[in-house]
Amino acid sequence: MTLLELTGVTASYGPVRVLEGVSLSVPEGGAVGILGANGAGKTTTLRAICGTVRAGGRITFDGKDIRGLRPDRVAALGIAHVPEGRGTLGRLSVLDNLRVGAYLRKDRKAIAADLDYCLTLFPQLRDRISSTASALSGGEQQMLAVARAFMARPRLLLLDEASLGLAPGVAKTVYDAIGRLRRESGIAMLVVEQNANLAFTLVDTATVLETGRTVLTGSAAELRGLDEIRRAYLGG
Ligand code: ATP
């Protein structure tokens, strides 16, 4: 079943149109990548879904029209966003960041169990539980950002450039944990990632954007086999 569907989505910053027609769909429990060059509109696509930029076209989640909803309403429906730059609360501790992630929930026992699960998924965070987020390394901050989003128990996770600025080994650790989270939680994921090799370890299908338009959608295996994808995104 389709969980998220975008059809002909448009968006602008002031007078400048940056999305011209983005169409993609994420099935329940599926993971979909968005590939594209710098400035193609990947981040803006996630913002259109979250309601942080005004969008045209059609955006449905679980069959309901969510285009134009305020960001807090979108979050309450079960969409969590891990923005580029992570968006953790620097002055709060790791533990408090995770608690903030769960602020809309009331099921205290389940929250405690999920907190423990996060710390199993990212053992580094258990060691740093009382540190302020700003004192963490880049990799640990990214782990915290993902864990915090999970604490909301969303049905869909939007991930923006989770590998940005991380050493290759650290980026792999982060993606391995996200893959495990996906398998164990069944949360659907829409993933923006410059590093397509890494994205393909996580996603089933991907959509390629060029100057604000969807130009290609296919399975990870199909896309990997295309020369143009290999040249543009896979370094070969
Ligand atoms: P990147 O990998 O560089 O983040 P992207 O594919 O995510 O690229 P977007 O960040 O969505 O692309 O940007 C699409 C276009 O919109 C770019 O031309 C960018 O310069 C422009 N843009 C992005 N944010 C803003 C903003 N807040 N105000 C004005 N223009 C913006």
Image (cartoon, rainbow, N blue to C red):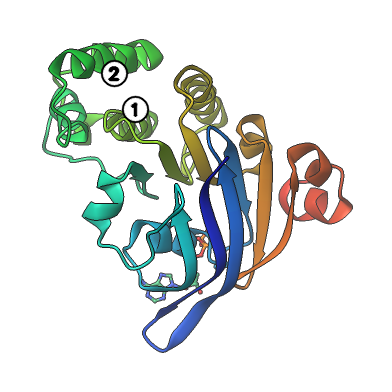
The image shows residue 129, relative to residue 191, as above or below, that is above
Please identify the quadrant where the N terminus is shown.
top right
Residue 208, numbered circle:
none
| Residue 115 in the image, given as x and y percentages of width and height | 24, 17
Position of 73 relative to 177 (above/below):
below
Q: Residue 167 location in percent, x, y? A: 51, 32
**Residue picked out by circle 1:** 140
* 205 or 89, nearer to the observer: 205
Would you name the residue on which mark 2 appears?
A: 125
- Horizontal and vertical percent for residue 171? 52, 31
Image point 15% across, 28% down: which residue?
99
Depth check, front residue: 5 or 21? 5
Dot 2 crowding, Cα within 10 Å, few <14, some 14–19, many 20+: many
Q: Secondary structure at mark 1?
A: helix
The C terminus - image quarter: top right
Q: Position of residue 52 (x, y in %)?
A: 31, 64
Instruction: Kindly give the residue lying farthest to the bottom in the view shown.
Output: 15
Instruction: Please tell me which of labels 1 and 2 falls first in the chain.
Output: 2
The answer to whether the residue bearing label 2 lies less than 8 angstroms from the nearest atom of ligand 1 is: no
**Residue at 81%, 48% in the rendered image:** 230
Q: Check disc 1: other Cα within 10 Å, few if <14, some if 14-19, many if 20+.
A: many
Please tell me which residue is depicted at 64% across the width and 63% down the height of the picture: 209
Q: Is residue 236 visible?
A: no
Q: Say which amino acid is labelled 1.
A: Glu
Which residue extends farthest front? 63
The quarter of the picture where residue 11 lies is bottom left
